[in-house]
Image (spheres, helix red, strand yellow):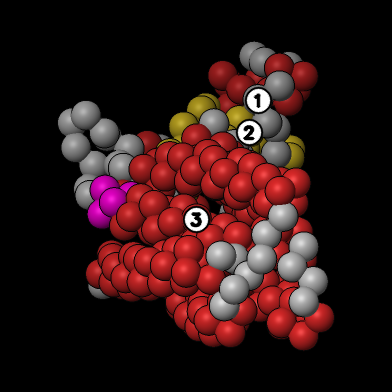
Amino acid sequence: MEQLQKQRAAIISVAATSTLTIIKLLVGWWSGSVSVISEGLHSGTDLLAALMAWFAVRQSGKPPDTEHPYGHGKFESLSGAVEAILIWLACFLIAREAIQKLIHGVEVSQPAAALAVMAFSTIVNFVVSTHLFSVARKTESLALEADGWHLRTDAYSSAGVLVGLGVLAITGWHFLDPLLALLVAALIAKAGYDLLIQASKHLLDASLPSSEEKIVANILQRHAQNFINAHHLRTRQAGKQRYIDLHLVVRGDMTVEEAHQLCDEIERDIRKSLPDADITIHVEPESAFEKHSEDEVSHHRFIRRMPKSK
């Protein structure tokens, strides 16, 4: 069900950005407005991003296989990183065109048409991005969230161009048009940087947010009476899937069945708070743990010393 929601949202984004790209480029060429043309290029990168998001969503939903035993979640992270590069390419093209217009001069011949298409773009992008954010939150889709930020940034920049063109229509200050295009380029560059940072964290196996690791630590604390120590906590995320592994030190007299049951209880509680978590717990006997100094254990993400059960 979630996979279907993600695919529908991605298709809606492709349809909306395709329409806006064509309209903006045609109106920008007809009116001579470089800011509208830059917005058309902006929407063009949004279209590429939407297509990539659609592809990434389809791929990330595939189950694990022999070549990808951990699943395909990182397709979404890879999509986000490539989208960031496309955003910066659009920035360069927009800025170059705007600077040339500032040097050689420009005149917007049809400001009314430019105003109309910017108003239409602002409304469509805001509505579609709101839907993408909603689905991304429900499904934890980085690709849809990235696509949503593409469109939300487009909505804000379109609104800014709309205001600027309104001032141009009233005052006749045509130099405002390339200045607005440079502002659009700056907004797009910032969005690309934020997106690349987020995607890189997933691709480089950065730890889960501290708030989520704290959830794991609190759950371990609730079970502290049943084991001696928990350490070597490692976490990462790929798409929607979270991966958590840790070492659990148990009493020497605990049976394999008792240790297995304890791990099942801990995993169940973690999944209640962090759905779709893939959890691996390595059980160690008390005798093996005591051979290592606390400093050695601390080197492996020591969580906290648990009291020995009596």
Give the residue at x 74% y 51%: 102
Residue 83 x/y as whole percent: 48, 46
Give the magenta part as a residue range: 55-59
Q: Is residue 74 magenta?
A: no
Tell me the quarter of the image containing the N terminus. bottom left
Mark nearer the viewer, 2 or 3 = 3
Could you say which quadrant of the image residue 74 lies in?
top left
Which residue is denoted by mark 1 in the rendering? Answer: 300
Distance from Cα at disc 1 to Cα at disc 3: 48 Å
Tell me if 161 is positioned left or right of 238 in this view. right
Q: Mark 3 belongs to which amino acid? A: Leu
Which residue is denoted by mark 3 in the rendering? Answer: 41
Secondary structure at numbered mark 3: helix
Tell me if 221 is positioned left or right of 253 in this view. right
Which residue is denoted by mark 2 in the rendering? Answer: 231
Give the residue at x 65% y 25%: 300
